[in-house]
Amino acid sequence: MKPTADEVVKAFKGLAIAAARAKGLAKEHGREKLLGNLNRRKQDAVRQHLLEIETDVQSLVQVMTGKNKL
């Protein structure tokens, strides 16, 4: 089923909001304040999420720019 224009806009808007929030937290508090109070397992989980997000964003950029097709 083809996504509607509203669904596409909402998805990208959600991505932009989440990225801006994470960027703001990192800028305001720095790495130590964000991760310092987390145990090792949770720190590893955050790093893993970042790696997954990075891969997803790279794939998305490639698809949107026509350099790679799914």
Image: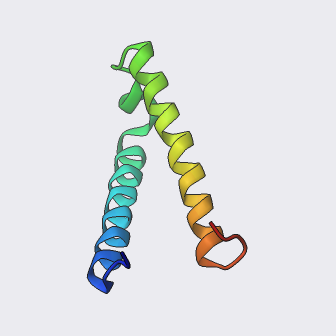
Q: Residue furthest front?
A: 1
* Quadrant of residue 33 within the rendered picture: top left
Q: Position of residue 19 (x, y in %)?
A: 40, 57
Q: Is residue 19 above or below residue 1?
A: above
Q: Quadrant of the N terminus?
A: bottom left
- What residue is rendered at 42% in x and 49% in y? 27
Residue 31 image point, x, y percent: 46, 34
Q: Is residue 26 above or below residue 35?
A: below
Q: Nearer the viewer, residue 25 or 44?
A: 44
Left or right of 43, for residue 56: right
Residue sitting nearer the eye, 31 or 55: 55
Q: Quadrant of the C terminus?
A: bottom right
In this view, the residue farthest toward the bottom is 5
Pick whichever, 50 or 11, lies toward us. 11
Q: Is residue 70 left or right of residue 40?
A: right
Front one among 58 and 5: 5
Say which residue appears at 44% left-offset and 27% top-offset. 45
Residue 65 percent across, percent down from the top left = 64, 79
Q: Is residue 45 left or right of residue 59?
A: left
